[in-house]
Amino acid sequence: MGYMDYRGTYIVVLKSEQPNTVQIGKLGLLGIHKGYYVYIGSAMGPGGVMARLRHHRKISQRPHWHLDYLRAQMEFYQAYALFSLERKECECANLMSKSEIASEPINGFGSSDCHCRTHLFYFSSHTKMVTAISRISEAGRINLDLLC
């Protein structure tokens, strides 16, 4: 298996420059604030993490995942990955939800196939976002690689 096919867990950071509202599929309306939105997902299928990140970097003409709806309104800022054959997205989301600096903007986002409240988190500043992602790595002993 080549590097480009590695499966695993990823974190996408989107940046919002201005307030807005977006319809997230059947979940409903999400009020967007200026700041950073962190989404935690996994890619265990063909192409792995890199293929999923290529998808999320573009604006989807036909939204499929919850993040596709949000991505259309925000700048793709950066991405992290944990290459593993094990799904770690729920572990990472649970660690993030325990952070006092993270807020959960909408229940059910990216978590329709698990028992997590959400896989989307909001941060009002760059410093808070970086701190929260660092804490995931430290608390879960998870080695996240900054990809872009």
Image (tube, rainbow, N blue to C red):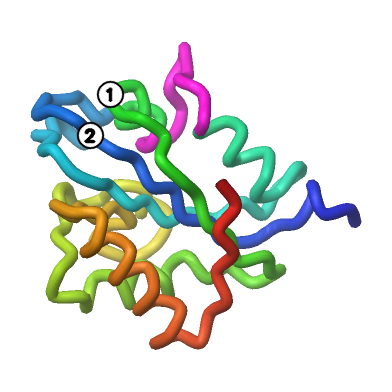
- Residue furthest to the front: 127
User: Residue 113: x percent and y percent?
Assistant: 42, 54
Q: CA distance from mark 2 to mark 1?
A: 8 Å
Q: Main secondary structure of the magenta part?
A: loop
Q: Residues within 10 Å of mark 2 (few under 14, many from 20)?
A: many
Residue at position x 57%, y 31% in the image:
55
According to the picture, the residue beneath numbered tag 2 turns out to be: 16
Q: Amino acid at mark 1?
A: Gln
Residue at position x 38%, y 47% in the image:
13
Left or right: where does residue 67 sit relative to residue 57? left
User: Residue 94: x percent and y percent?
Assistant: 32, 74
According to the picture, the residue beneath numbered tag 1 turns out to be: 73
Q: Secondary structure at mark 2?
A: strand
Q: Is 80 rendered above or below residue 137?
A: above
Residue 64 part of the magenta-drawn span? yes
Residue at position x 60%, y 66% in the image:
82
